[in-house]
Structures are given as C-alpha cells and as structure tokens.
Amino acid sequence: MIRRNTPTKDAILQVLSTSGKALSQDAIERRVELKVNRATIYRVLNQFCEDDIVHKIVAEDGKQYFAICRKCENPEQVVDHFHFRCLSCESIECLQIPVEYTAPDGYAVERTNCLLTGTCRDCNIA
Amino acid sequence: MIRRNTPTKDAILQVLSTSGKALSQDAIERRVELKVNRATIYRVLNQFCEDDIVHKIVAEDGKQYFAICRKCENPEQVVDHFHFRCLSCESIECLQIPVEYTAPDGYAVERTNCLLTGTCRDCNIA
DNA sequence: ATATTATTGCGAATATGTCGCAATAATACA
DNA sequence: TGTATTATTGCGACATATTCGCAATAATAT
C-alpha cells in the first residue's frame, strides 16, 4: 500500500509534533485546525503506527494515546520506555526512563505498555 | 458503606482465586457457577478494588482485568509488579518482577500499570 | 420478626474504536 | 496537461466495554 501525502495527515502530525505529548483521538480532533472525521483520525494514526512514525500506548482509562517519540525518530534507540500520565493536566508523555526487567524463563516478550500515573512537575509546582 | 456477604461475591472471589490469573468481566461471567449480571460483576470487582482485595490492570486491548495478588494478600509487599499478557492463551498473570524506575524530579507517581506482552512459557513449549 | 439499606438484575445510556461503502483527491504516466 | 488508478476521506452503522438509574431482593442488626 503506497502512502499519499494529504493535508489531513500533515495536520495530525503537526498537532502531535507541537504538543510533544501523547494524545488521544478526541484531543487530536479538538486541536487540529481542519475538521477531520473520527474514523479518519484513527485510520491515519494506525497507519502512522505501522510506519513507525508514532507509537501507541493504552492508559488505565482504556483509551489509546499516540505520540511521536525519540524511539521513532532514531531507530537505534529501540529501548522501550515508561510513560507518565498526569491526573491533573490529563497529559501523557514519554519519559526517558527505559523499562527494565528480566522475563521469567520461557517467556517471550514482544512489546511493553508501561505507564506511571500521578501528577507531573508542572502541576506539582502550581 | 458497610459490606455484606453474598453468594455472588463469594463466587466471583472463588473464580479469581482458583484461576490465579487476571480475568476480565466476561471471563469471570463465563466461569462463575451462578448466573451473575454483567453490571453486578463490575460493581463487585470495583468494590473489591476499593477494599484492596483485588487489583485492576488495563491491557492494550483497553479492557480491564482483575486479579488477586500477593500484593493484596500481604500489604507489606507494596511493590508494584509487572504483568504478563500472553497473546496465545489470552491470559494475564502477575509476575514477581518489581517495577523499578526513578521518577523525574517533581513527578509524583501514584500507581503503575505495567504490562509485558508476548507468549508465555506454556505456550512456547507447546 | 422486622426495619434498614446493601446488593442485584434489568434496561438503557455512554464511549471508544472499527468497518463498509461511495465520493474525493493524490499520484503516475501517456 | 489530461487521464487512469487507487489511496484517502466522510458518513453512517456497528461492536464492545463499562456505567448508571431504578425497582426488587436479600443480608444484617436489633
């Protein structure tokens, strides 16, 4: 499937890029300048995931969040990292903290989804 | 709110206890001997969470899973732990691997939701 | 035995995410 | 530059997970 450049894709990427955090579909829909359909946003985001442009994490609210991250930008940094979800400002950000563990014998780990929840620095200062 | 003992609660706890793994609402509904309403199962499970009888984790499928765990049984062991979700046998289990990290300055962590996904030992042998 | 109120079942409501289909638009190529 | 191909989009509908209100039932204490 050959990709095509569209204003919609640009706009969504723009939102993710300037936000610097992980955003959910509805957050993206609210921030994007164009009016983009819900299903389209999901399709674009899932495509970005396939192409390793963004990565997806699922929070304890059961929702999907999407973020551009260093991991995606430079593929050498393949280490999985923790994410932080702030209960006060509702943001989710990528932390530069690698996820470290030793899987039990016989267990094969394919991917991780690791989330710390609490209040972030900005919210604790205020 | 004073708690009352009911057959429903006993049965649900029984299922979680004998399974030894984290189960979703529908998995519990299928395994429980009594016929219990969906909403009731959620209410009971959420109450168990409040009372620290079980703990909840959210998987990348966005669903909630509930498990009795050592952490709940002996409160001294307050360390958060990783969970493992097997894509082959669809189970989620508590691993005895503590979640270790150093939160960035100013960040307050309240709870964690850490999941490793892959294939478990039983499934890798088969 | 009875009053109090926690618990349950039922139906409906909400929310998230996906899918099929038809219309539109991006790209390649003559 | 015009045209064919097909990726993309919007729309509506669908599936699923979870919650909520309300009335009926049942667990506990007196």
Image (tube, coloured by chain):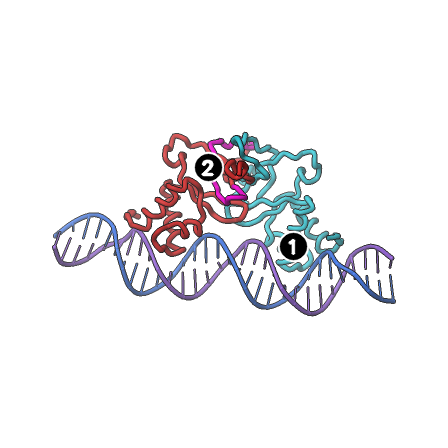
Chain colours: A red, B cyan, C blue, D purple
Residue at (57%, 36%) from the top-left corner? B109
Indicate left or right for B40 with A63 as reference: right
The answer to whether tags 2 and 1 share a subunit is: no
In front: label 2 or label 1:
2
Residue B5 at what x, y percent from top left?
A: 76, 53
- Determine whether, in the image, residue B55 is placed left or right of residue A12: right
Residue B61 in the image: above or below residue B119: below
List x then y, in percent, for residue B114. Answer: 55, 39
Whether pointer 2 and pointer 1 mark residues with C-beta atoms closer than 8 Å, the reply is no
State whether the magenta stretch is mostly helix, strand or loop: loop
Label 2 and label 1: CA atoms lie apart by: 33 Å
Q: Which residue bears the numbered disc 2?
A: A94
Disc 2 secondary structure class: strand
- Helix, strand or loop status at disc 1: helix
Drawn side of residue A26 relative to residue D18, left or right: left
Chain of the residue that carries numbered disc 2 in the rendered image: A
Q: Position of residue A57 (x, y in %)?
A: 47, 43
Q: Position of residue B63 (x, y in %)?
A: 54, 50
For disc 1, the marked residue is: B43
Q: Amino acid at mark 2?
A: Cys
Q: Is residue A42 visible?
A: no
Provide the residue span drawn in magenta: A86-105
**Residue A36 seen in render:** yes
What amino acid is at disc 1?
Answer: Arg
Which dot marks residue B29? none
